[in-house]
Amino acid sequence: MERLQRGFFLDRTVKISVTAGDVDIDLDGSTVEIEEMLALLRQDDTWSLMINRLQVAKKSALKAAIAAAKASGLPERGSAFTTLVDSCSLKRKPDQVLGAIHYLREIEGVMDSPPRVINQLFEDAGMESPGNLSLYLNRLRERNFLIIPNASDDKNRFAVLSEEGRAHLDKRSSK
């Protein structure tokens, strides 16, 4: 209700309409009447049922969006990695592999990156994949650019940039 200048009240008509699956809520009336109808809906669980249906629909839509993005190859992923490679002037393949590991861990939050994941990143970016990834990883490790945790048997999956590796990328980006 709105209060007018001389103490009079004006009651507005309110309309609420919500549909979720086979549950329809269509309320029409004054503010007081709507509040009373909503209280009744809450008592007989109609409102809770509606909220649950909307939450299920939201989760379903989110899953569908994620699946569609994955199916499309995530084109923004490739362009983001290309931007990293270009902005850091990573011309040589070992530097690009170092950049890929950095990108996967720090940008995408991927901690387990087997060769297929690294190669897919290169493909998404429209770049030639490294091929013999073990060779590059060994060379980067020898240069102290990568750390392979002792608990990890598979060095192709769990490589982490060392301080020297990060400094190398920083140095490349400043050129």
Image (spheres, helix red, strand yellow):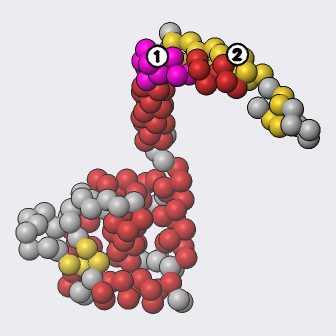
Residue that appears at 70% across and 16% down: 28
Predominant secondary structure in magenta? helix
Disc 1 marks which amino acid? Answer: Thr
Residue that appears at 27% across and 83% down: 162
Q: Quadrant of the C terminus?
A: bottom right
Q: Quadrant of residue 59?
A: top left
Query: Could you tell me which secondary element the residue under label 2 belongs to?
Result: strand
Q: Quadrant of residue 12?
A: top right
Q: Which residue is mark 1?
A: 46
Disc 2 marks which amino acid? Answer: Asp
Question: In this picture, is 111 found above or below 30?
Answer: below
Residue that appears at 53% across and 89% down: 174
Q: Which residue is mark 2?
A: 28
- Magenta region includes residue 34: no
Distance between the alpha carbons at the discs numbered 2 and 1: 17 Å
Question: In this picture, is 121 found above or below 146?
Answer: above
Q: Nearer the viewer, residue 20 or 101?
A: 20
Q: Nearer the viewer, residue 30 or 108?
A: 30
Q: Please state if 60 lies on the left or on the right of 119 as rendered.
A: right
Q: Quadrant of the N terminus?
A: top right
Bounds of the magenta span?
Answer: 38-50
* Residue 56: assigned label: none
